[in-house]
Image (tube, rainbow, N blue to C red):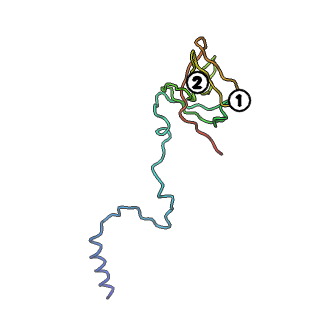
Amino acid sequence: MTDKDEIIQGQEQSQSLPSMAQTEIHAGFPSPATDYMTQAIDLNKELVKHPAATFYGRVVGDSMIDAGVEEGDILVIDKSLEARDGDMAVCFIDGEFALKYIKFREGGLSLLPANDKYPAIEVSEGSDFIMWGVVTYVIKKVR
């Protein structure tokens, strides 16, 4: 077979191939991680279900440390959600914001810390109290 024969044969075969590859063509060693790559994650789309009613807040203090919530963590707070028993919520009581678990009881509710150093706060009809929002996510810095 001559060089001319090979060229002609190659041209004949190339006419039956698609003009554009339907998959990626790697030049070099492909990373095994590329099998797991997806589109970029938009944290607002992932974490915020009600944009007009969602806020972020930064934790100060250690009253929820046994729940894994530490000073400096960022809270995603949804004001449109109705609090349920056991929810972690941001409450406004007696002129201050507080992060606590909600416990409904007959005649009122209790705000429960997740740290034995702090007492529960009993909320009754006469209390200056607003359920400000339900915590839906806690964002932590790990390094």
Name the residue located 67 percent from the left edge and 29 percent from the top edge. 63
Q: Is residue 137 left or right of residue 3?
A: right
Q: Is residue 52 left or right of residue 108?
A: left
The correct choice, above or below, for 137 with respect to 125 in the image is below
Q: Secondary structure at mark 2?
A: strand
As drawn, the label of residue 103 is 2
Could you tell me residue 109's position as x and y percent?
58, 20
The correct choice, above or below, for 88 with respect to 8 in the image is above
Q: Is residue 57 left or right of residue 52?
A: right
Which residue in the protein does label 1 denote?
116
Three-letter amino acid code at the position of disc 1? Asp
> Which one is nearer the viewer's eye here, 45 or 6?
45
Which quarter of the image is occupied by the N terminus?
bottom left
Q: Is residue 112 left or right of residue 117?
A: left
Q: Quadrant of residue 66?
A: top right
The correct choice, above or below, for 21 with respect to 45 in the image is below
Name the residue located 29 percent from the left edge and 80 percent from the top edge. 9
Give the mark nearer the N terminus: 1 vs 2: 2
- Residue extending farthest to the front is 106
